[in-house]
Structures are given as structure tokens and as C-alpha cells.
Image (tube, rainbow, N blue to C red):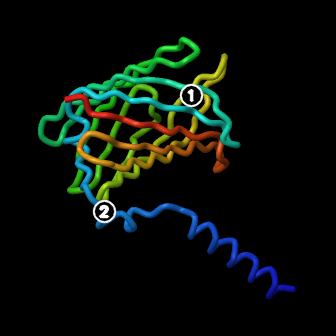
Amino acid sequence: MIFRALLTSLLALGLVACGSANLEHHQSTEPKLSLEQFFNGKLKAYGIVLDRRGNLLRRFEADLVGEWEGNQGELKEWFRFDDGEKTTRNWRLTKTGQNTFQGQAEDVIGIAKGESSGSALYWRYQLEVPVDDTIYHITLDDWMFLFDDKRLFNKTEMTKFGFKVGEIILYIEKLD
């Protein structure tokens, strides 16, 4: 009985470990993502928000403008949702190491942290999400994958108390 419980626990742990993405898997992928290069200038984004079961909740477009000076960057985002809502986010970014980054924005709780490897960037942060009269704190696990020098794909899993509550899929195109 104890053996069966231990075996079940190890199998479950192994499945979780196999299912999670890892930056090391992207180390040799090309083209190499340079956050400060890609997010410099004007960009256009198109995205969808899905619920935890994968059902479409919303569509959106966003205009982005990024500027970098040395290790400091600013990324301004203007979102337009299909239901008429408009929001903005202004990121203040810092390159803290060769492949590591930190960021802050008005609706981000604390400091966002990211690391790049090859063509991928993993970015994690908590976001204040207003729904009616309540503000929820949602954790975002952001994966960005550079397709070429002008296109990037972004897949974000949103969780609350460790449970998936939704997903964002985003395509960003460099206009400059």
C-alpha cells in the first residue's frame, strides 16, 4: 500500500516535471532573442484571451512603442479589446545581466522577472486584474518565442492559487 502511494506520487511528479517548459531547451534555438532590440521602436500586437478550458473570452489589438538606453528600457502598450474596453500599461525595464531582466508597471505587483535563452524569453509576474468591483491578483507565466527579426509569439498562462484560470495568446510584429 505504501509502495503504491509512493509510486503514484513519483509518477505524478514526473509528469509535472515533463510538462513544464524549460529555458535550457531553447539555448541553441535561432534567431537569438534580444529583448532590447526587438522591443525598440513601434510594434503591433494581436491577441486572444481564453478561459481555463480554452474557450475564447476576448480579442484585442495593441500598439506598442519601446525605447532603450543602455540597460534601461521603457515599453508603452495601448490595448483595444473587442468589447470596447481600452487600457494602457507602461513597463519600466532593466537588463540586470546578460540574459536576465526585471520590469515594473502600474498594474504589476512587485517586480516582474525574466530570463532569455536562444529565441525564448520566460517572464513571470503578478498582475492586478479588475473584474467588476473586485481586483484579482493573477500570476502570469509568459513565454515569448522570436520567430524572426520582425515577429514574436507569446503564450501566457494565468493562474490563481496555483490553478489555471486562463491563457493569453499573442502575436507581436515589429513595424520599424
**Depth order, front residue of 81/175:** 175
What is the residue that sits farthest to the right in this orientation?
Answer: 1
Compared across the picture, whether 58 is left or right of 68 comes to right
Query: Residue drawn 51% across and 43% down?
Result: 140
Task: Give the secondary structure at mark 1.
Answer: strand
Amino acid type assigned to the residue bearing label 2 in the image: Thr
Callout 1 crowding tier (Cα within 10 Å): few <14, some 14–19, many ≥20: few
Position of 67 relative to 125 (above/below): above
In the rendered image, residue 131, in percent from the top left (x then y), is placed at: 64, 22
Q: Residue furthest left?
A: 70
Give the residue pinned by disc 2. 29
Assess whether mark 2 and mark 1 are in contact (beta carbons under 8 angstroms). Answer: no
CA gap, disc 1 and disc 2:
34 Å
Depth check: give the residue in front, 81 or 151.
151
Q: Nearer the viewer, residue 12 or 51?
A: 51
The quadrant the C terminus occupies is: top left
Assess disc 2: are there few (<14), some (14-19) or many (≥20) residues with their C-alpha within 10 Å of its C-alpha. some
Spot occupied by residue 52 in the image (x, y as percentages of width and height): 67, 42
Q: Which amino acid type is marked by label 1?
A: Val
Residue under circle 1? 129
Say which residue appears at 36% left-offset and 35% top-offset. 172
